[in-house]
Amino acid sequence: MASKGAEPVIRMEGVSKFFGTFQALKDVSLDVKSGERVVVCGPSGSGKSTLIRCINRLEKHEQGAIIVDGVTLNDSRSSLNAIRAKVGMVFQQFNLFPHLTVLENLTLGPVRARNMARAQANDLAMSYLERVRIPEQAEKYPRQLSGGQQQRVAIARSLCMEPEIMLFDEPTSALDPEMINEVLEVMTELASSGMTMVCVTHEMGFARRVADTMVFMDHGELVELATPETFFSAPESQRCKEFLQKILHH
Amino acid sequence: MMRVLLLLSMAALLSGCSAQWGWYVVNPATESGLANLKFLLSGLYYTVLLSLTAILISMVTGLLVALPGLSENRKLRAFNRLYVELVRAVPILVLILWVYYGLPQLSGLAISVFWAGVIALALSDSAFQAEIFRAGIQSINRGQYEAAHSVSLSYADTMRFVILPQAIRRILPALGNQLVYMLKMSSLVSVIGMQELTRKANELVVTEYRPLEIYTILVLEYLVLILIVSAGVRWLERKMQADERN
Ligand SMILES: Nc1ncnc2c1ncn2[C@@H]1O[C@H](COP(=O)(O)OP(=O)(O)OP(=O)(O)O)[C@@H](O)[C@H]1O
Ligand SMILES: [Mg+2]
């Protein structure tokens, strides 16, 4: 992957997305290189979720082009399957399968979609549970875990599909404060392993530590794109300045 | 509790108007009474077989009708509505007569009483099953589909491993209701000669002229059968909940 050089692994060109007549994304262009960590922030309703949901085709864009690792996103089944295999996603509400154990949550995708043997899938799942530091919870059901543990299971579940890109949609906003760090630590470790990541988050400490690129969105527009240094010290737009002031000093 | 109530009411009935009753027809102590009792109970086999076969078919059909009802495609949704509205509008007894006497003329194939009953009961129930499944599936959070999408599950696998197991847990009480309903409705198949509980009772009444006792036994037969089914469904509910907890 890293050998692809300057070729971006995600390329969004003039992407627009409508919900009915409401335009949620306005002519958004964004390139993400392999191994790059992008943090997206912006006020509520600015289109952050919509942006990353378009990348794994949970939403369809109407205009522009999205190309992920050489695959152009369109209505074809082959493109959909290729994209889903390459892109993992972690949700704000975890979305674990409540009727399955932690281990079953992790192995369902590998066994059914990657045709992996059960024993091999179990080994894979255990190795990722160790990576998110909860191997002892393998036989439990999601509801028996804390929010932080559930989110780490959700991260492990995505990693079991061995994606090239991981998307995070406010992974810590549904968590109690004392559990935020355990999830951010797992994400930081993932970042240091070279995973390509696009994270919607308002955890600015995390953003400062791991982001290569900061993106600020407002009203469906990609307003600002900069390195964290520039972004936090000298944002260009007034909208971004005001936003940062609000979330850094509340 | 239930049993005590039953005994008390039986005792009251028996003592209050003993002159009217002739329990000898089903007295297991006498040879003819025992034979009559066995005759009545022999209907159990077809009542259970008919109801179980019909409910299995109606659940599968109901699910297959529910799925297009959840589609984004307008024509598929229209098919679902049409099926549910049409089938739901036909009285079961009418459907039984139509399938048994009408369908052979239409198709040219003779149809057995058993299968005519199964088809009519299953068809009629499937419209209700379709609505139950649709509601159950709709009650599952969208996030479950999105998570299944992001781990690359196909539509069939998403339904089979993620959505339906959760939906079925939620609709289990309603499915139990339908089974109870089916057991009761199976009595209607007696009109085309199915040898189930009600038919047996009717035949015995004709020879013994003791409708009061025989139909009382019939009522008790259904009551016990349905209490057992209810207990079974309740047990299944508890078991499934426990599965999720431990
Ligand atoms: N399925 C939908 N149907 C209609 N409108 C939608 C839908 N999803 C999102 N929107 C609208 O699109 C806009 C952008 O939504 P989006 O969820 O991307 O915002 P966001 O930046 O992620 O906000 P938040 O911080 O609250 O999560 C919002 O105004 C929202 O109301
Ligand atoms: Mg959002």
Image: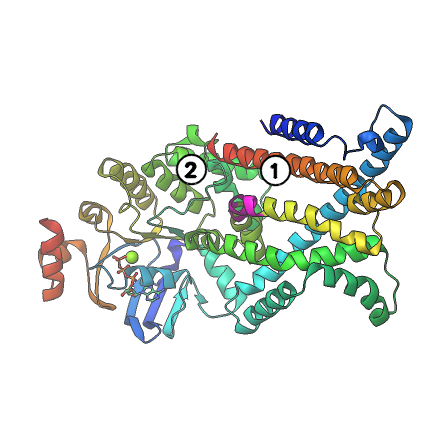
Could you tell me the amino acid type at mark 2? Pro
How far, Cα to Cα, is label 2 from label 1? Answer: 30 Å
Q: Residue at x 35, y 63 (%)?
A: A8
How many neighbours does mark 2 have within 10 angstroms: few (below 14), some (14-19), or many (20 or more)? many
Q: Position of residue A47 (x, y in %)?
A: 27, 64
On the rendered structure, is A125 left or right of A179? right
- Which chain letter goes with mark 2? A
Q: Does residue B81 sit above or below B135 in this rendering? A: below
Could you tell me the amino acid type at mark 1? Ser
Membership of B81 in magenta stretch:
no
Q: Position of residue A187 (x, y in %)?
A: 31, 43
Quadrant in which the N terminus of chain B is drawn = top right
Residue B53 at least partly seen: no
Name the residue that disc number 2 marks.
A142
Nearer the camera: disc 2 or disc 1:
1
Front-lying residue, A221 or B208: B208
Q: Position of residue B138 (x, y in %)?
A: 48, 56
Residue A239 at least partly seen: yes
Q: Quadrant of ligand 2?
A: bottom left
Q: Residue at x 32, y 63 (%)?
A: A51
Element marked by disc 2: helix
Q: Which residue of the protein is positioned furthest toward the top in this rendering? A: B29
Provide the residue span drawn in magenta. Answer: B166-174
Front-lying residue, A7 or A85: A85
On the rendered structure, is A12 left or right of A181? right
Name the residue that disc number 1 marks.
B230
The quarter of the picture where residue B64 lies is bottom right
Q: Residue at x 9, y 66 (%)?
A: A238
**Magenta portion: prevailing SS class:** helix
Element marked by disc 1: helix
Q: Position of residue A234 (x, y in %)?
A: 9, 59
